[in-house]
Structures are given as C-alpha cells and as structure tokens.
Image (cartoon, rainbow, N blue to C red):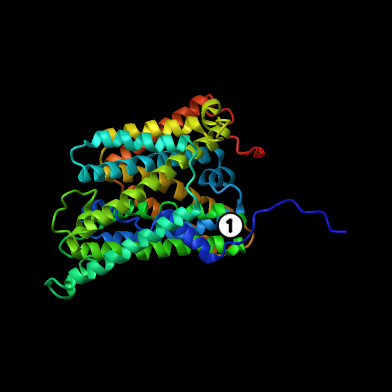
Amino acid sequence: MPEATAAPRLRRALTLWDLVLYGVIVIQPTAPMSVFGVLSNRGRGHVVTTILIAMVAMLFTAISYGRMARAYPSAGSAFTYVGQEINPALGYVTGWSMVMDYMLNPMICIIWISQQAHVFAPGISYQVWVVFIAIVFTWLNVLGVRTSARINAGLAAGMGVVIAIFFVAAARFIFGVPHDGVAFFTRPFYDPASFNTGAVLGGTSIAVLTYIGFDGISTLSEEAENPRRNILLATVLTCVVIGLLSALQVYAAQLIWPASQPFPDETTAFVSAAGRAWTPLLAIVGITLVVANFGSGMGAQLGAARLLFGMGRSNALPKSFFGAIEPRRRIPRNNVLFVGVIALAGALVIRDFGLGAELLNFGALIAFMGVNAAAFIHYFVRERRKTISNLVPPLIGFAVCLLLWLNLSRTAQIAGALWMLAGIAFGAWKTRGFRGELVDFSIPAEEEN
C-alpha cells in the first residue's frame, strides 16, 4: 500500500546559476545607464571608479545578507534582522529607512521615464508625463497585474542584445577617432586633472543605486538547491557580474563622451553617448531604458506597498490602514495608492533624478549598515568560536557603507534626517515615550487561498 502523500513543498530546482540569472534580471543589466550622467558630474568623470568601489562595498554587504538569509530563511528583511538580533527599536528605525528607500524607487523611475518621454515628445510637458506614468503604475498594481518570470527573462535578453549592439558601436567609434594615447583609455579610471577623493566618494554613494535589489535572491531560499551554500554565493556573484558589466558600459560611454564635455541633459546622458556612437542607438537605448525603468518602477511600487504592509502587520505603522488587504485581489491596495500619491508628488516637486537617487540611497545605506551589524552580532558576538571570516566582512561592509552614507550631498542628508526624525517622533508618540511595545515581530501564519 502506498505511503501517505507528504504535504506539498516547493520544488528545489534552482541551481546556482539560475539564482545568479534571477539576480541580474531583478537588478537589470542596464542599471548604470540611467544614472551615468549623474555619476559623471558628481564624481568629476570617474564613473568607472565609483561603480567599482560601490561593488566592493556591496560585496561585503552581500555576504552579510546571504548569511542572515541563512539564519532567517523565511523573513528576508533588514527590518527583521536588526530587530531580532540587536534591538526592536533599531529594527523599527531600519524599517523606517527602508520605507524611504522603497517609496523613492518608483519616484525616481517616474522622473527618468518622464524626462526621457519629454525628449521623445517635447510637445507634452514633463508634468503631464509624470501624472500619466504615476497613474499607470498605480492602476496596474491595483489590478494586481503580475509580470511572469518568462517576460522578465525576455526583457533581460532584449536588454542584453541592446548592450551588445552598444559595445560594437562604441568600439567602432572609439577606434575610429583620434585620441591622445594611453591616457585616453586610463582617464575614465583616474584623471589627475579632475580627481578629488570627496567627489569620487560622493559619486560612489550614488553608484550604490546600480546594485539595489541584490537582496531579492534571499526570497528564493525554499526553491534553491543547497540553499545554505548557493544563496550566499549567488548574492555575491550577482554583485560581481552586475559590477563588471556596469563598469564596462560606463567605461565605453566615458570614452565616447569625455567628462570635459557637458551633457545636453544629465538624466539622459547615456542615451546621448550611445547616439554619438551610432545615431539609431539614440532611439533604441532610449526606448530600452524607458521599458526597463517602467518595469522597475512598477515592481518598486508593489515592493514598497508590501514593505508597508509588513510594517503595518507588525504594528510599526497604523495596522488598520497599512495592514489591510483588499479581499478580492488580495493585495495591499491602500499601500499601493499611498505609494502612488507619494511618488507622484515627489516627481513633481523634486524633478532632480540625482537628488532622488541620493535620497533613496540614504535609506538603503542605513539598511545595509543594519544588516552588517546584525551579521556581526549573530555570527561573531554570539558565537562561541570567534573567527576572522565572521568578523571582517560585516565590519568592512558596515564601515564602507557608513563612509558612503557620510558622503551623500548635504541636501540629501538634511532631507533624510528629517524623514528619520519624523519616524522616531511617530515611534515616540505611538509608544508614549518608548514605554510601550514598538514592534511586534511575530508574523502571523499565511491564510490559505
């Protein structure tokens, strides 16, 4: 007689390279293109250098994320890691910084798409494009539209083809124009005439945006082969692949359009460089980036809504609003609408893609520091056997993220500090001077479909 059928489980079918491919798709192979002009101006032309320094910072943080995903395989949140390992109040502060990070992501996507759309159709104002894109994002997410993995893979393949075409066109252009010898090829890494440590660190603090999303790999723990090994390796390898690919893209773009020449528009600088290499790329790359940012913006809005739901369910935010689920489509509709309104208002008021990116990274770097601190506590302080491998990565990751956070622009630091103060004030009001329970980290069981 056959044995009783076991309860259904997710199939462990994802190999290490499947996980890496997923990570690259989530982050997007065109990630540095949208921020190229901002990095060039802020880093005084050293875009390649900022991308590579940011990669080192993210590698150590990726190690901490991978290890914490092993310790909390079903949580996968900096908010939870810090709250459980260090202190609930610090977990709340980390979650509040993540709210800033997640809510600004759709906003900067709306800014970029609207500015590029205005270039394509100058007869329609930037403000009209902002309203249109924000409404479309929100409407599709309220409907509960899901983008399948096959569509994501198809988009990534299409982006890969565009990147390959760009590299061919760039090589033809670069070797077809006169240049001043070896210095021409080394200047994107180091230009003695314009190098400034503060400027490079400031650019690096924005370059972190290129890697945002690598932590999403931890959500696949239950479907991965040998997850204790492969989740950590995939997170690190994804950062390496994205970092090297990004460095090659911006290196070619810098050779095509030297930093000494101002861009027509900082936000769409990479599109201008691609168009200089081969005129048809002006439209091809522009449309590709619109599609890429459209997908990112929609996903970011839903991700922000899910984060707000998690914090509402944990009682860190008003549960009646943020912890509610729309019964028919089973989505956090209140949060989707809330994020849509914030993104719309922000895109209309800020308009500056670079400032939006820095504000996003203000919150992201706080969360990254929190994860590194949690990994240090969990794997070194609380372990009986102290090892260098458990000490060095989280300390370096924390230190580099702190250095980059301190090198954000003064405007971003002030705005970010005001956001954090507002969150702390809300927490103090909610707990009557922090005398009550701030956050409930116990997650209720999922309801059956």
Q: Position of residue 216 (x, y in %)?
A: 50, 52
Q: Which residue is drawn at the image coordinates 34% and 33% (left, top)? A: 344
Tell me where residue 104 appears, x and y as whole percent: 37, 40
Q: How crowded is the residue under tag 1: few (<14 C-alpha within 10 Å), some, or many (20+)?
A: many
- The quadrant of the rendering that contains the N terminus is bottom right
| Count of marks placed on residues | 1
Residue 46 versus residue 346 in the image, above or below? below
Q: Residue furthest right?
A: 1
In the rendered view, would you say 238 is above or below 132?
below
Picture residue at 27% right of the left edge, 37% below the top: 129
Element marked by disc 1 = helix
Asked whether, in this view, residue 208 is left or right of residue 195, the answer is right
The answer to which image quadrant residue 300 occupies is top left
> Which quadrant of the figure has residue 281?
bottom left
* Above or below: residue 95 compared with residue 237: above
Residue type at numbered disc 1: Tyr
Of 135 and 297, nearer the camera is 135
Q: Residue at x 32, y 63 (%)?
A: 163
Residue 25 percent coordinates (x, y): 44, 57
Q: Nearer the viewer, residue 352 or 448?
A: 448
Query: Residue 58 location in percent, x, y?
Result: 42, 58
Of residues 344 and 189, the one nearer the viewer is 344
Write down the residue under mark 1: 379
Residue 362 lies in quadrant: top left
Q: Image quadrant for the C terminus?
A: top right
Locate residue 375 relative to residue 55 in the image: left or right: right
